[in-house]
Image: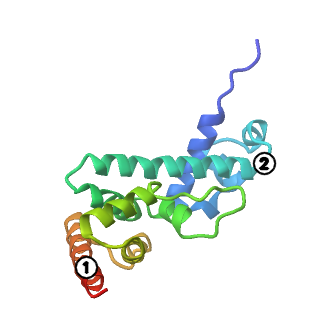
């Protein structure tokens, strides 16, 4: 009977993923993953033809983790228009290495762009309906909020500053309110 495989595909991906969570995506190499698993590098190359294939799996797993934040936050206490932003901020604070992987580095050609808000057109239409903004104004409002949220998330992920969940929520509400006032005023002034 052939020997039982101790390190299967999922085991290898999980070891590489945990390494990325702790030390960053750049830390993934054959020796580091093997050490994380407590093995030689042989099982990695039995399952994956090269490290790029393994890294692609880690990238996908990081996307799934971020999607779980979005799902969990939508079922939480935040308004629907703030839920995705709060998910982004919480993900940056609680999973800084994965946040850096998804949102703070140059992507390779093989990696698809990961967008937090895959329903851009729906979001713009909602903003137009709820605020009375034109499409162009709603798009600028959306861009404004994205810049604010990404800046705040980057500060969280890099440890420049770490805010409580309540403080993040308050800042998001305040910025949303302030931007709404500005863009409504611009809309009424033509």
Left or right, residue 124 beside residue 109? left
The image quadrant of residue 80 is: bottom left
Q: CA distance from mark 1 to mark 2?
A: 53 Å
Residue 149 shows in the view = no
Callouts 1 and 2 close, C-beta under 8 Å:
no
Position of the N terminus, as image quadrant, is: top right
Q: State the image coordinates of residue 27 (x, y, percent, origin top left).
A: 63, 61
Residue that badge 1 annotates: 184
Q: Residue furthest front?
A: 190
- Residue 50: assigned label: 2
Position of the C terminus, as image quadrant, is: bottom left
181, above or below 113, in the image: below
Depth check: give the residue in front, 82 or 141: 141
Left or right, residue 99 beside residue 141? right
The image quadrant of residue 145 is: bottom left
Local packing at callout 1 (Cα closer than 10 Å; few below 14, some 14-19, many 20+) is: some
Q: Residue furthest bottom?
A: 189
Q: State the image coordinates of residue 152 (x, y, percent, origin top left).
A: 36, 75
Disc 1 element: helix
Residue at image location 25% in from the left, 76% down from the top: 180
Q: State the image coordinates of residue 76 (x, y, percent, origin top left).
A: 23, 49
Q: State the image coordinates of residue 101 (x, y, percent, origin top left).
A: 55, 62
Left or right, residue 172 beside residue 153? left
Depth check: give the residue in front, 57 or 22: 57
């Amino acid at each position: 009977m052939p020997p039982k495989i101790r390190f299967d595909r999922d085991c290898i991906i999980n070891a590489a993923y945990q390494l990325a969570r702790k030390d960053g995506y750049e830390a993934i190499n054959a020796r580091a993953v093997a050490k994380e698993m407590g093995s030689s590098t042989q099982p990695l190359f039995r399952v994956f033809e090269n490290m790029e294939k393994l890294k692609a799996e880690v990238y996908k797993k990081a996307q799934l983790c971020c999607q779980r934040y979005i799902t969990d936050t939508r079922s939480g206490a935040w308004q629907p228009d703030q839920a995705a932003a709060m998910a982004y901020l919480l993900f940056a604070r609680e999973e800084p290495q994965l946040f850096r992987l998804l949102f703070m580095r140059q992507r390779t050609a093989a990696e698809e762009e990961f967008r937090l808000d895959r329903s851009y057109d729906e979001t713009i239409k909602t903003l137009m309906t709820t605020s009375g903004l034109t499409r162009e104004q709603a798009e600028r409002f959306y861009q404004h909020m994205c810049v604010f949220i990404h800046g705040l998330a980057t500060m969280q992920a890099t440890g420049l500053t770490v805010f409580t969940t309540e403080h993040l929520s308050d800042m998001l509400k305040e910025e949303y309110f302030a931007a709404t006032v500005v863009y409504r005023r611009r809309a009424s002034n033509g």
